[in-house]
């Protein structure tokens, strides 16, 4: 059964074949969607282009921190697709030193960069694309348990994810009158390039394998499957929520 048959949307944040965004994009195509991917710059575009070979996906360049880029890509997407049925936001960034030094040492500029790129970019994308969203569109973003609990070395990114989750709820309220749903998925630690930027990441995976109810970390494909549910009509009554796809680790007290 193809749950996204006839739907059109864009996935922001495809970096390489191991990225969660790529897993979501591939799964959406398999479920019948017409999928565009959004990449930040020419370097990422060159890398992503290799992934797109042999697929029906189109590529659009857009830095979500640049209003001019958002305005341009909205026009390009409207010309290519008319209305969009879904938007996937899988974009986050913090300075390397802010993921290795104690949180109290976070610089003012590092704080701004992390919050703007990892949280505000979701708001900016929603605002820019809202005029071309279908009335029953679905928006999803990717968060992490570090928004609620202290995870050593996650630092300012945890603060950014907390802001992102609050943004999800407020966007759900603002857009709900049109039937547009806004939700977040909270995957457990997954072995991606960005995750490996967190000091001690290998140790985190080991802990998940020991303590999660399923005794293993979650996988990209499992996050993609939950994304398809949220992007499809099966979730029409779900908005403003954080769905955990973490092998159950988030329910554990110790």
Image (cartoon, rainbow, N blue to C red):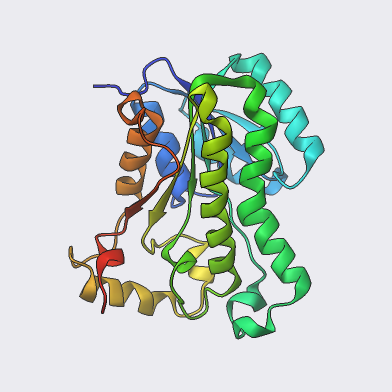
Residue 120 left/right relative to 169: right
> Between residues 44 and 6, which one lies in front from this camera angle?
6
In which quadrant is the C terminus drawn?
A: bottom left
In which quadrant is the N terminus drawn?
A: top left
Query: Residue at the spot x=26%, y=75% of the render?
Result: 253
Q: Vertical placement of 74 versus 214: above or below? A: above
Residue 129 left/right relative to 140: right
Quadrant hosting residue 144: bottom left
Quadrant hosting residue 149: bottom left
Q: Where is residue 181 in the image (x, y as percent from the top left)?
A: 47, 32
Q: Position of residue 224 (x, y in %)?
A: 36, 42
Task: Tally the marks.
Answer: 0
Q: Vertical placement of 18 versus 170: above or below? A: below
Q: Point out the residue furthest to the left here.
A: 214
Q: Point out the residue furthest to the right here.
A: 68
Residue 14 shows in the view: no
Quadrant hosting residue 62: top right
Residue 74 left/right relative to 157: right
Query: Residue at the spot x=63%, y=27% of the render?
Result: 130
Residue 33 shows in the view: yes
Q: Where is residue 114 in the image (x, y as percent from the top left)?
A: 66, 63
Q: Vertical placement of 116 versus 84: above or below? A: below
Query: Residue at the spot x=70%, y=22% of the render?
Result: 76
> Between residues 109 and 190, which one lies in front from this camera angle?
109
> Between residues 134 and 13, which one lies in front from this camera angle?
134
């Amino acid at each position: 059964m193809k749950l996204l048959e006839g739907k059109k949307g864009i996935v922001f944040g495809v970096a390489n074949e191991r990225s969660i965004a790529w897993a979501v994009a591939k799964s959406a195509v398999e479920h019948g969607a017409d999928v565009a991917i959004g990449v930040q710059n020419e370097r990422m575009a060159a890398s992503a282009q290799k992934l797109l070979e042999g697929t029906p996906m189109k590529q659009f360049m857009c830095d979500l921190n640049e209003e001019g880029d958002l305005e341009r890509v909205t026009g390009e997407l409207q010309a290519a697709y008319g209305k969009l049925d879904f938007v996937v936001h899988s974009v986050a960034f913090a300075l390397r030193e802010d993921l290795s030094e104690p949180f109290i040492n976070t610089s003012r500029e590092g704080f701004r960069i992390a919050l703007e790129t990892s949280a505000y970019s979701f708001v900016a994308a929603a605002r820019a694309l809202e005029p071309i969203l279908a009335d029953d569109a679905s928006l999803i973003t990717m968060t992490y348990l570090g928004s609620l609990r202290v995870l050593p070395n996650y630092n300012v990114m945890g603060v950014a994810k907390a802001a992102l989750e609050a943004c999800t709820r407020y966007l759900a309220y603002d857009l709900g009158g049109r039937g547009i749903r806004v939700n977040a998925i909270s995957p457990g630690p997954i072995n991606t390039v960005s995750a490996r930027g967190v000091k001690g990441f290998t140790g985190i995976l080991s802990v998940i394998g020991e303590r999660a109810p399923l005794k293993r970390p979650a996988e990209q494909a499992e996050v993609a499957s939950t994304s398809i549910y949220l992007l499809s009509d099966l979730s029409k009554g779900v908005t403003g929520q954080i769905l955990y796809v973490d092998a159950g680790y988030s329910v554990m007290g110790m």
